[in-house]
Image: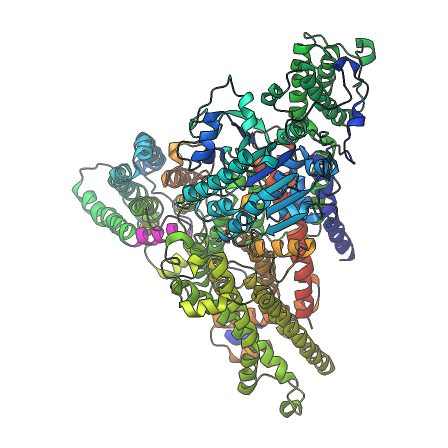
């Protein structure tokens, strides 16, 4: 096959988008319902704590870190297909809605809860340091505010990375495509891109001379990430679903 | 293609036109009266009492005018002041204190203009100071109180002036002084020598009887401010020293007969902000002290409260006693010393001094002349209105002046006030009141800014800038397929144009560029991850450049909000032990040396007879050549390094602590001007030699039909780098090592032409701010502007000022050219025809193909102008957008509170970016490097 390839010196090499299908949320009522309720709960929780975060970011961000983790774990477990599993596999068990059915619970624990907690572990242990380092590279303070930055990194990791690990696993090539923005957009991927863009854009109001308390580090960044997550997830799950980011 | 070039040339030519049109509308036109004022001008005013043609008898006949640079009001009047003698004079009533409001820009030369002419110099004077030719920028031909004293007949002939201190006065008033000794404020680290040079003349001059005015200008206090701020431990001792000088002079006035009628004025030309800098218009910068002293003043202060020290009117601000305008000094001196008020004066005679004349008509006459002189300027400005010296009816005026009449324009209300002066002429109380009312209003209107814009020109200028965008838009490279660089370029430009309307983002512009650059490097990372063969994750060159960018942006804290906050330079690692700094500087110089040595070696090899015989391939340098090259370059870069060390030892001695004393002593004794001339000369010589060698090579290549590698472009870049190092402050030099690493890393990333241009733009801007500049006049660094110049030469100094402040953008503009054409990159000449035989893996295949294609393309690019043309098109478009944004912001916000403090300095910087940086560097110098790269 290789010998047949003729090289055209003027040909440009275009990036090859992933052929993977966009992630579909599970086809049961709970999943369909909760996937829309989830961002509302996350945002409400953040809005509820917002004043406390502005007043003293570290304890407040720490306080909502565990609830956010629980919410995200619940979200992926209820709504999303774990890695390597297509939604159709789930379809094999139609009509099994009763929660107390022991068989369902068992398969639920093995099939969704365990991967969900593994994703949480990965997001916390691998993604948080990486994202914190990225924040520092983008200008987060080095000598002060260590906990502030670390907590921002953790929040961004839980919002963006946890669901991605859950649905895509840890294959290197998949993650290259994720970083390269080559995956088709779906609610998980959209949520990640939204979180990142939101956090990045969150830096814009900091230098303005409005002299508001909320302009302090890292309130705008985390707020941007939360809003970006909700917007990205919504758009990714609806309008932009299946689209691919195409640029040379 | 041809039409594109025409459009591009047209767009570029429009840039300066747009700037000039806008600037003439934005910086208001000020009527200027040539010639010296005389009393004969004063017309026919019998009503003003007997002897109306004679000036009122002057209470003083000698003047000592002592300027203490940056003498903020609280340094004299405050509770923490060290000037106890002056405060005791205020308590005795023999000193009259004021706070003299200085208008922005608060730098010495425009302030001296304001003090001496009484006019209110605007921002345009800042440019004119650099731009005007030597003769017209002086005040020698203008009407000032110095000229008036020189023209006045004293008992012993025409007035004589002596001057000691800041040589700004000597530049402004050439051949004015009988005796003078100028000191230059060249090294701000000099706190004592500059002042001792002034002080040593004073005792002797106080015994001389021949002068009529002595001007002293002390710089030490300003230097302390620049170095260590107003709270420096050196500040109070310096104030004490100044206070002792005041005591010396005042005691002489009290004791010496020939000085009995001497008026002694002490003032600051401007103040300083909390960081110790000045140029802007914060309360600290605009509130210098002004004190008049003489035993005779006791007559005036009988009724007033003689308190000192006092607290300012508002806490944290600097308004002590009465706030007057700095321009009021000129008419006050004219009245007190008995000479005509300078023609362009917009100051008002200070009413405290009216008490000198027992006869009211003397004072009224003085004020009437003052008002009449100001009226002439007003008349010149509002030429359509009537300012006759007689009472006019509403019919002649063309409008009603009654108090109920509203909606009068500024000019009309001034005409009405002038009518008030006419009606009350000869009235003892009303006359004074009306004169003051007219003068205050005229002062405010004429110095005010809002009414003076030529709005039509503002709109035309903005429209022209828009046209630049429009024209250059059609010259841009193809917009499709949509590339990440194209998207990011668009986002950056549109966001920038929007942010120009936010005053805080103008002040903190660096944050925008740091932010945008970080995002762009990350996007480059994403971009390269999109290629199938990419296998680097964390150790990716884009990440490495991002990390370096993170270091670079912390190097110098800049902007307004956190001015003075900790940064790498001030963190102490360079101060406590200069060895670290100088090792880094040494490494930077070594890197440049080795690079230039390689070019020299190549040029030597060109004439290598051994290799010449082969003739058909490009001759490369041998080890022997390289050895020779290094030996040849070492003296040049060594001189450059020693110059930097010697200069820093004088300019910023805290950066050379910890270096061996004897060596420093030896170095400090060297002649700086000579050293730097040797460096510049050596660079010129090496450049011409390499040019000759490369030209020879190019001729041979053409004969062989081969293509060059653009080595000469790289050589030129490296030599310009050495020049820029000479123009950079020592603590910033290690940044060029980081820049150089960034350039090398960027060559590893496969950048499209648009991406290269965008990278150039982002890094030019980033480096400008990272080197410590901001959009504030006070951040302009003048310390390297006299390198190699022994006498004042406007164009050379202006060029060096630009090059030392825009060194980073110059560096990156040229680095961008090298990235664009991959000049000097190793050529592998992959034969793509053989690829299909040799490949095993499609990815490897693809990679090699890509590389081969790029090398091929670069070779083609370097020959032609197209790639460069597109680069310039993008940057012209950027310049258009930038100018458009700044001009639209200045037009829309022309009534904004911050227009003179934030937006007009930004416009001045935009002018420099648009003309000098885009025109001179991107198009001019960049074009040169691109052209020689194609040899």
- Residue B822 is at least partly visible in this image: no
Q: Is residue B752 above or below residue B907?
A: below
Image spot of residue A247 (x, y percent): 54, 53
Residue A114 in sight here? yes
Q: Nearer the viewer, residue B727 or B690?
A: B727
Per the rendered image, the range of residues in magenta is A126-141
- Quadrant containing the C terminus of chain B is bottom right
- Residue at image position (68%, 7%) is B404
- Residue B299 higher or lower than B750, as above or below: above
Residue at screen point 66% across, 55% down: B792
**What residue lies at 56% left-to-right and 64% top-to-bottom?**
B672
Residue A129 located within the stretch drawn in magenta: yes
Is residue B502 rendered to the left or right of residue B708? Answer: left
Pick the quarter of the image with the N terminus of chain B: bottom right
Quarter occupied by residue B51? top right
* Residue A9: % across, % down: 61, 70
Furthest toward the left, the residue is: A102
- When asked about the image quadrant of residue B630, the answer is bottom right
Residue B625, how many percent across, how many down?
57, 85
Along the horizontal axis of the image, is A149 left or right of B89? left
Residue B172, percent from left and from top: 68, 45
The reply to whether the magenta stretch includes residue B59 is: no
Q: Report the front residue among B250 and B896.
A: B250
The chief SS type of the magenta part is: helix
Whether residue A240 sits left or right of residue B690 in the image: it is left
């Amino acid at each position: 096959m290789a010998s047949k390839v003729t090289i055209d010196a003027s040909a440009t090499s275009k990036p090859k988008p992933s052929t993977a299908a966009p992630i579909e949320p599970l086809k049961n009522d709970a999943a369909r319902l909760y996937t829309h309720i989830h961002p509302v709960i996350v945002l409400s929780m953040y809005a509820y704590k917002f004043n406390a975060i502005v007043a003293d970011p570290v304890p407040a961000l720490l306080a909502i870190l565990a609830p956010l983790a629980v919410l995200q774990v619940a979200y992926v477990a209820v709504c999303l297909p774990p890695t390597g599993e297509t939604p159709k596999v789930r379809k094999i068990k139609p009509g099994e809605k009763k929660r107390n059915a022991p068989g369902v619970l068992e398969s639920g624990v093995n099939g969704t809860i365990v991967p969900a907690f593994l994703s949480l572990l990965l997001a916390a242990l691998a993604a948080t340091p990486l994202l914190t380092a990225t924040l520092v590279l983008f200008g987060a303070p080095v000598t002060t505010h260590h906990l502030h930055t670390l907590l921002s990194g953790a929040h961004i990791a839980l919002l963006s990375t946890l669901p991605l690990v859950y649905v895509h696993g840890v294959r290197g090539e998949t993650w290259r495509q994720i970083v390269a923005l080559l995956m088709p957009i779906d609610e998980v991927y959209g949520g990640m891109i939204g979180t990142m863009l939101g956090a990045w854009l969150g830096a814009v109001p900091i230098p303005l001379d409005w002299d508001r308390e909320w302009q302090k580090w890292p309130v705008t960044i985390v707020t941007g990430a939360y809003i970006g997550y909700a917007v990205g997830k919504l758009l990714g799950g609806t309008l932009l679903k299946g689209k691919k980011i195409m640029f040379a | 293609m041809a039409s594109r070039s025409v459009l591009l040339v047209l767009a570029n030519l429009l840039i300066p036109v747009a700037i000039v049109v806008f600037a003439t509308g934005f910086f208001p036109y000020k009527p200027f009266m040539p010639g010296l004022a005389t009393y004969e001008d004063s017309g026919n005013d019998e009503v003003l009492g007997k002897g109306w043609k004679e000036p009122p008898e002057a209470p003083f006949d000698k003047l000592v005018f002592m300027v203490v640079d940056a003498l903020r009001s609280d340094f004299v009047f405050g509770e923490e002041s060290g000037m106890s003698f002056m405060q005791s004079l205020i308590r005795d009533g023999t000193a009259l204190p004021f706070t003299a409001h200085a208008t922005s820009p608060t730098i010495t030369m425009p302030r001296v203009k304001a003090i001496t002419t009484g006019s209110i110099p605007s921002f345009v004077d800042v440019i004119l100071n650099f731009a005007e030719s030597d003769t017209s920028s002086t005040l020698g031909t203008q009407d000032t109180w110095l000229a008036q004293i020189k023209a006045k007949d004293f008992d012993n002939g025409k007035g004589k002036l002596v001057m000691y201190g800041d040589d700004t006065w000597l530049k402004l008033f050439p051949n004015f002084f009988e005796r003078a000794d100028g000191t230059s404020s060249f090294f701000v680290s000099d706190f004592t020598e500059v002042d001792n040079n002034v002080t040593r003349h004073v005792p002797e001059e106080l015994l001389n009887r021949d002068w009529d005015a002595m001007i002293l200008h002390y710089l030490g206090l300003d230097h302390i401010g620049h170095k260590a701020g107003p709270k420096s431990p050196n500040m109070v001792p310096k104030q004490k020293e100044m206070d002792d000088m005041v005591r010396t002079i005042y005691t002489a006035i009290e004791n010496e007969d020939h000085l009995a009628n001497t008026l002694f004025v002490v003032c600051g030309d401007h103040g300083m902000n909390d960081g110790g800098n000045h140029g802007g218009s914060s309360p600290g910068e605009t509130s210098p002290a002004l004190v008049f002293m003489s035993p005779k003043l006791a007559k005036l202060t009988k009724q007033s409260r003689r308190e000192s020290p006092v607290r300012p009117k508002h806490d944290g601000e600097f308004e002590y006693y009465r706030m007057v305008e700095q321009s009021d000094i000129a008419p006050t001196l004219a009245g007190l010393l008995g000479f005509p008020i300078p023609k362009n004066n917009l100051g008002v005679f200070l009413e405290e001094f009216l008490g000198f004349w027992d006869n009211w008509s003397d004072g009224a006459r003085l004020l009437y002349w003052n008002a009449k002189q100001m009226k002439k300027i007003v008349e010149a400005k509002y030429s359509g209105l009537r300012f006759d010296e007689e009472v006019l009816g509403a019919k002649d005026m063309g409008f009603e002046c009654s108090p109920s009449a509203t909606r009068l324009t500024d000019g009309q209300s001034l005409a009405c006030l002038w009518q008030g002066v006419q009606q009350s002429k000869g009235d003892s109380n009303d006359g004074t009141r009306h004169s003051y009312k007219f003068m205050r209003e005229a002062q405010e209107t004429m110095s005010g800014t809002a009414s003076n814009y030529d709005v039509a020109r503002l709109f035309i200028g903005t429209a022209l800038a828009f046209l630049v965008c429009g024209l250059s838009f059609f010259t841009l490279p193809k917009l499709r397929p949509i590339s990440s660089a194209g998207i990011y370029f668009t986002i950056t430009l549109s966001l920038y144009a929007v942010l120009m309307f936010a005053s805080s983002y103008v002040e903190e512009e660096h944050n925008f560029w740091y932010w945008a650059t970080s995002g762009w490097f990350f996007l480059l990372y994403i971009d390269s991850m999109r290629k199938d063969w990419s296998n680097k994750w964390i150790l990716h060159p884009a990440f490495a450049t991002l990390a370096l960018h993170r270091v670079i942006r912390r190097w110098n804290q800049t902007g307004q909000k956190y001015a003075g906050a900790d940064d790498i330079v001030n963190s102490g690692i360079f101060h406590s032990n200069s060895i670290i700094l100088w090792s880094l500087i040494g490494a930077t110089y070594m890197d440049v040396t080795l690079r230039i040595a390689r070019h020299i070696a190549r040029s030597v090899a060109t004439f290598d007879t051994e290799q010449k015989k082969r003739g058909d391939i490009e001759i490369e340098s041998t080890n022997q050549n390289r050895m020779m090259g290094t030996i040849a370059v070492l003296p040049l870069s060594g001189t450059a390094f020693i110059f930097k060390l010697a200069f820093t030892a004088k300019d910023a001695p805290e950066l050379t602590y910890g270096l061996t004393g004897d060596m420093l002593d030896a170095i400090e004794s060297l002649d700086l001007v000579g050293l730097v001339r040797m460096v510049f000369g050596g660079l010129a010589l090496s450049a011409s030699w390499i040019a000759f060698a490369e030209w020879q090579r190019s001729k041979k290549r053409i004969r062989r039909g081969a293509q060059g590698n653009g080595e000469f472009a790289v050589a030129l870049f490296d030599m310009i780098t050495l020049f820029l190092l000479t123009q950079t402050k020592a603590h910033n030099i290690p940044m060029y090592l980081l820049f150089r690493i960034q350039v090398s890393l960027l060559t590893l990333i496969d950048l499209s032409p648009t991406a290269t241009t965008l990278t150039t733009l982002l890094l030019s801007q980033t480096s400008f701010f990272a080197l410590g500049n901001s959009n504030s006049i006070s951040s302009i660094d003048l310390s390297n502007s006299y390198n190699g110049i022994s006498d004042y030469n406007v164009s050379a100094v202006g060029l060096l000022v630009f090059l030392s402040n825009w060194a980073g953008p110059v560096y990156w503009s040229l680095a961008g050219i090298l990235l664009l054409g991959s000049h000097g990159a190793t050529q592998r000449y992959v034969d793509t025809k053989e690829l299909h035989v040799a490949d095993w893996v499609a990815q490897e295949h693809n990679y090699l193909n890509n590389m081969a294609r790029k090398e091929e393309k670069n070779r083609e690019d370097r020959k032609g102008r197209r790639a460069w043309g597109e680069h310039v098109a993008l940057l012209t478009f950027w310049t258009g957008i930038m100018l458009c944004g700044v001009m639209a912001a200045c037009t829309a916000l022309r009534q904004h509170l911050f227009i003179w403090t934030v937006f007009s300095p930004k416009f001045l910087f935009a002018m420099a970016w648009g003309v000098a940086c885009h025109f001179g560097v991107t198009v001019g110098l960049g074009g040169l490097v691109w052209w020689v790269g194609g040899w």
